[in-house]
Image: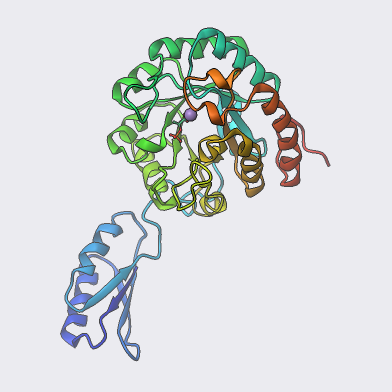
Amino acid sequence: MIIIMEEGAPRQAIDEMIAAVEAEGFQPFVNPGVERTVIAVLGVVNVEKVQVADKFASFPGVERVALVSEPYKLASRAHHPAGTVLNIRGVTIGGTELCIMAGPCSVESREQTLEIAHAVKASGAHMLRGGAFKPRTSPYAFQGLGVEGLKILAEAREQTGLPVVTEVMDHSDVEQAKDYADILQIGARNMQNFRLLRCVGATNLPVLLKRGFGCKVEDLLMAAEYIMAEGNAQVILCERGIITFETSTRFTTDINAVPVIKHHSHLPIVVDPSHAAGDWRYVASIALAGIAAGADGLEVEVHNNPAKAKSDSAQALTPEKFDDFMRRARLVAAAVDRTIGEVPVG
Ligand code: PEP
Ligand code: MN
């Protein structure tokens, strides 16, 4: 932490600041500077420093306080230098092998879900995604099949062996989903629903945490910290596009977030090209870019009859298009020393 005093701050203010730093158990290093005094604060890095920084910033004669270390700990790479590799029913995420999660936006029926599950499995997907509880902009739009949808997902897992990823929006969804799902998804709209984060943090299920479309990378990592602080270290981050001034796609994929998150955190990160694009035409390109950028996997929407889909029909890939995409994905993965269902060559 660095405390930057105002230009011409009186000696008394500087002395009071130094005393306060010492009183908190830190060691102050004072650099008088030509224009202003800067105090470097040395001590054990811990997350409580954030609160102390706010306190120091309110002292007379202080211009600002800058934090050198990150405000999150459990999610930070400094805390856990090796990348985390999760193993979910034998499927790994975070290692050399990419994890491709694919499936419909919503579970609409048993037939629809089973057909899509078998198709994505045949193309090499590792997990099945599908929403039983849907966050919809309109209260009149299809809200999902609820528990019935969870049962269909569990049947699809039984038939295909694919672990299941499904979204939860509140405590009661978590209670119901934890008996069926392998990964609980927190959607973009709930990324900062802190009670929900604590709630999934109290389960022993892995959590797929999607970045809020108005949230910074640091906000995403702080949200992961909420889950981890409850004792659940199995967090997978997801970049799914953010709001920018660009309107030609539904959201803008922040591809930069992938290497940035890899640098600051040990948690696996996947890219969702479907919600970012909002249009199936762009999905494959964005997904390939995600792999090239170093993502540990993808979450892609696939529908057997997009024109009839009850949600997100415009962005769904058909099983044929998904199959063609997977072929190209293997090539891009190999170019960045990753694999999709294959043993690395050489
Ligand atoms: C979804 O995955 O179906 C979804 C609603 O995604 P997001 O929360 O990223 O909008
Ligand atoms: Mn969707």
Residue drawn at x 70%, y 23% as measured from the top left: 320
Q: Is residue 26 above or below residue 155?
A: below
Where residue 95 sits in the image (x, y, percent)? 63, 38
Q: What residue is rendered at 32% in x and 89% in y?
A: 35
Farthest residue, direction bottom: 34
Question: Where is residue 25 shown, x and y percent of the image?
Answer: 25, 65
Q: Is residue 118 above or below residue 197?
A: above
Residue 161 is at least partly visible in this image: no
Report the side of 197 relative to 117 (left or right): left
Q: Quadrant of the N terminus?
A: bottom left
The image quarter containing residue 21 is bottom left
Q: Nearer the viewer, residue 302 or 309?
A: 309
The reply, left or right, for residue 116 in relation to residue 185 is: right
Q: Position of residue 43 (x, y in %)?
A: 34, 65
- The reply, left or right, for residue 236 in relation to residue 193 is right
Front residue of 237/278: it is 278
Q: Quadrant of residue 147?
A: top left
Q: What residue lies at 30% left-to-right and 69% top-to-bottom? A: 65
Q: How many marks?
A: 0
Quarter of the displayed picture in which ligand 1 can be seen? top left
Q: Nearer the viewer, residue 145 or 270?
A: 145
215 relative to 60, above or below: above
